[in-house]
Image (cartoon, grey):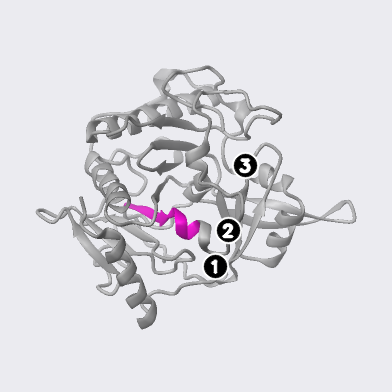
Amino acid sequence: MIENLPAMVEKKFVQAKSSGSLIFSITDLAIIRALGLPPFQLRYCPALAFKPEPRKKPDNVKGNNPFEVPDPNLLIAEIPYSKPSHSLILNKYPVIPNHFLLVTKTFREQNSLLEREDLDASFACLKSWNMRGGKGKLFAFFNSGEHSGASQKHRHIQFLPVEEMANVGGGAGWQLLADILPVAAGAPRRNSPPFPFLYFRRVFSAEPDPLEIYDAYIALYKEAVTADAKIKGHGIEEANIIQDAEDQPSAISYNLALTTDSMTLCPRRSGGAMISATTGGSEQALLGPVELNGTVLAGTLMVKTEDEWNTLRKEPAKLTELLRSVCVPIESGPTHRNENYDTRL
């Protein structure tokens, strides 16, 4: 457990915001109700267009890594206290208050498989927030692979307070998507079409131990890689699912969502996609690309131009098209039932 984690994060956030060590951006919020989807948050943040891009350097150069030596004004703590393996640091460019990251102290590739200690530390943060004075729960997400929305090579898992997501701008009817996914794969949905993209999900026992959490991650990853191999027409033996190797590169791009209740893995095929703006009933222009990361499993996305904002609000069906473009559309994936997994969103 991490004592007083919510208070530690909030205190550091207030200090960093006041000193200018982090740049908090205000967003406009709309709730999109597209056919086949629960209410989705759409945030408009023009400041995203001016966020500095990480400098591209050769793979063997680790310079210019903001996580290698964290800014002390953003550093919340190092955990576990006895022998730290990870740092907790604030997001430098948040749009949600108290957005923080769990970062490995030694360099590990973002696009490699998570290790057990990464998930142990993540779950410790989730439980500490829930049990030590937090105002609700945390949503954790991890972006891995070229098409996942990951922006840094140094391994990091991100955390957003769910109540802050709901409170920043309001948004009646929105619920955390990871909490309301169907329990059974391909479960029928009364008066609704199937959700548009593929995912794999595990619901935890009441008090999951570290081995259960890690085993769930590996099982979900194997399911996703196997599905990807089938979609591409490869044999299962070609999937190269997992080996006993440290820092093994992921065979697919994916987003992972984690709460104290469940874990969800969503394969990705694109980091973003263009959307078409419609005027007077005819297609006029392509906008974007609109880029998505693991917050898609929270039921939220952000855009950085007014045209994108207006188009998605006026034509909710384009949200469904966008999700089908960046994720794996459901008709591409398996529709079999498995007692441990959801395979249909």
Depth order, front residue of 63/323: 323
Q: Which residues are magenta?
A: 155-165
Q: Which of label 3 and label 2 is nearer to you?
A: 3
Numbered disc 1: secondary structure? helix
Numbered disc 2: secondary structure? strand
Q: Earlier in the sequence, mark 3 or mark 2?
A: 3
Depth order, front residue of 5/83: 5
Residue 132 is left or right of residue 147, and the answer is left
Q: Which residue is mark 2?
A: 302
Residue 75 is left or right of residue 189, and the answer is left
Residue at the (66%, 66%) spot, across then down: 305
Q: Earlier in the sequence, mark 2 or mark 1?
A: 1
Contact flag, marks 2 and 1 (Cβ < 8 Å): yes
Q: Residues within 10 Å of mark 2 (few under 14, many from 20)?
A: many
Q: Say which quarter of the image contains residue 224.
A: top left
Residue at the (67%, 27%) spot, across then down: 190
Q: Which residue is mark 1?
A: 48
Q: Which of label 1 and label 3 is nearer to you?
A: 3
- Residue 288 visible within the image: yes
Give, as a three-letter code, the residue at label 1: Leu
Q: Earlier in the sequence, mark 1 or mark 3?
A: 3
Give the Cα separation between the discs numbered 1 and 3.
Answer: 25 Å
**Disc on res. 38:** 3
| Residue 227 location (% of width, % of height) | 49, 25
Q: Is residue 141 magenta?
A: no
Give, as a three-letter code, the residue at label 2: Met
